Image: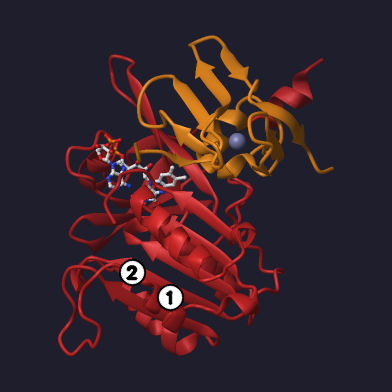
Chain colours: A orange, B red
Amino acid sequence: MLDYVDGSSLAGPMRELFAVDVTAVEGRCAACGLTGPIAALHVYGHDHGPGLVGRCPGCDEIVLRLVRTPTDAWLDVRGAVSLRFSL
Amino acid sequence: MARTAVSRRLTWRAAELREVRGETSSAHSLIFEVPGWPGHLPGQHVDVRLTAEDGYSTERSYSIASAFTDHHDLVELTVQRIPDGEVSPYLVDVLQPGMRVELRGPVGGWFVWRPADTAPVLLVAGGSGVVPLMAMIRARAQASVRVPFRLVYSTRTPEDVLYADELRRRALEDRGLDVTIVYTRRVPDGHGRPPGRLTAADLAEWGWPPDFEPAVFVCGPTGFVEAAADLLIDAGHEPARIKTERFGGTDA
Ligand SMILES: Cc1cc2nc3c(=O)[nH]c(=O)nc-3n(C[C@H](O)[C@H](O)[C@H](O)COP(=O)(O)OP(=O)(O)OC[C@H]3O[C@@H](n4cnc5c(N)ncnc54)[C@H](O)[C@@H]3O)c2cc1C
Ligand SMILES: [Zn+2]
C-alpha cells in the first residue's frame, strides 16, 4: 500500500505533547537497527481516524504509534530502541 | 508548576484569510494573517483544522510557501484541489477573505533549508510538492545567498505550473538559480522534451552530479517521491543527503 506520508507529518501532533520538535530526533529501529530521524518514518493513518502509525523505512516494522482521544494522547514507542536528542 | 512547559507546547491558533491568489484552475495561494506568528524556516509546514457546526473536526498538513519576514504576521499556503477530497476543495473553493481556520505551526525541523547551509541544493518537485521548495527559493533570494540552487519540477501540463510567472522571473534574476520544468502529459509549443515521467536522464542533465554532494529535497505525491528518490539513489546520491516530504496520494 502506497498511501503514507513522511514522519514530518507527526510534527504537529507531537508538538502538542512536547516542547521541542521531535521529528529531527534520531531513533533506532528495534527490529532492524536502522537509525534515522523520526521525520524519515513512513506514517500511515494521516488522513483518517485518531491513530497514526510510524513504520521503519528499512524493514516496515512499527516504530511508534500515536493515538488521540478527546482527553489524552497515547504514544507507544516500543519499536524504537532509543531516541537521541541533540542538545 | 508545569506552566512554562505547557505554554511552550503548540496549540491551535485562529488564522484569518486575507488574500487569495489564483495559481492555476485547481490551485490557490491563500495568505493568512496569524497574530503573533513566531517565524518559520523554509520547508516547514502547518496543520490546518476545520471544525463544522456540529463539532466534527478534521485536519490536514500544508507546507508554508512564503519566506518569513519579521515585519508582518502573514503566512502563505498553496493548496491544490483534490477532487472528492474532504479539506482541499473547501480551502480552494469555499474559503473567502475574512473567514477563519485554525492553524498549528510552524512544525517540522528536518525537511528544512537554512540560509547558512553551504552545500549546493537540488530541489525535485512533483505537482504541489513545489510549495515548500518555493519557500526555499524565496528565502534564498531574501537572504541574498549565492548557494547554487537547481529546481527540477515535474507537472502535468503548462497550465498546471504553480508560480509560473515568478519562477520565470527568478530563473532570469536570481543568480545561481536554475529552473527546469518536466511535463508529464503535454508540453508547451516548441518544447524539446516529449511529455513523460521524470527520468534518470532528466536528473542527470538538470540536477547536480552526486560528487557535488548536494543537499537534495524531494517533495510531492507519495508515488512521485518514491520514484524520484529511487532514481537519485541509483544515480549515486547518498541516501542521507536526500530529504523527502510525501504529500500522500499515489499520482505523480
Ligand atoms: C507534510 C505535508 C505537507 C503538505 N503540503 C501540501 C501543500 O503545500 N499543498 C497541498 O495542496 N497539499 C499538501 N499536502 C497534502 C494535504 O495535506 C492533503 O492531503 C491534501 O490537500 C488532500 O486532502 P483532502 O482532504 O482534500 O483529500 P482527502 O479527503 O484526504 O483524500 C481524498 C483522496 O485523494 C487522495 N489524495 C490525498 N492526498 C493526495 C495528494 N497530495 N495527491 C493526490 N491524491 C491525494 C487520497 O488518497 C484520497 O483517495 C501536504 C501533506 C503533508 C503530509
Ligand atoms: Zn527497521
Quarter holding residue B51: top left
Report whether B43 appears left or right of B198.
right
Chain identifier of the residue bearing label 1 in the image? B
Q: Label 2, secondary structure: give it.
A: loop
Q: Is residue B215 above or below residue B52?
A: below
- Residue type at the position of mark 1: Leu
Report whether B165 appears left or right of A11.
left
Q: Residue at x 16, y 73 (%)?
A: B186
- Residue type at the position of mark 2: Leu
Co-location on one chain, circles 1 and 2 = yes
Pointer 1 residue: B203
Q: Is residue B119 above or below residue B172?
A: above
Q: Are marks 1 and 2 in contact (CB under 8 Å)?
A: yes
Say which of A20 and A75 sits in front: A75
Say which of A62 and B162 sits in front: A62
Chain identifier of the residue bearing label 2 in the image? B
- Image spot of residue A56 (x, y percent): 56, 36
Report whether A28 appears left or right of B18.
right
Q: Quadrant of ligand 1?
A: top left
Q: Residue at x 20, y 45 (%)?
A: B93
- What's the mark number on residue B198? 2
- Number of marks in the rendered image: 2
**N-term mark: 1 or 2:** 2
Q: Quadrant of the N terminus of chain B?
A: top right
- What's the mark number on residue B117? none
Q: Label 1, secondary structure: give it.
A: helix
- Image spot of residue A18 (x, y percent): 68, 28
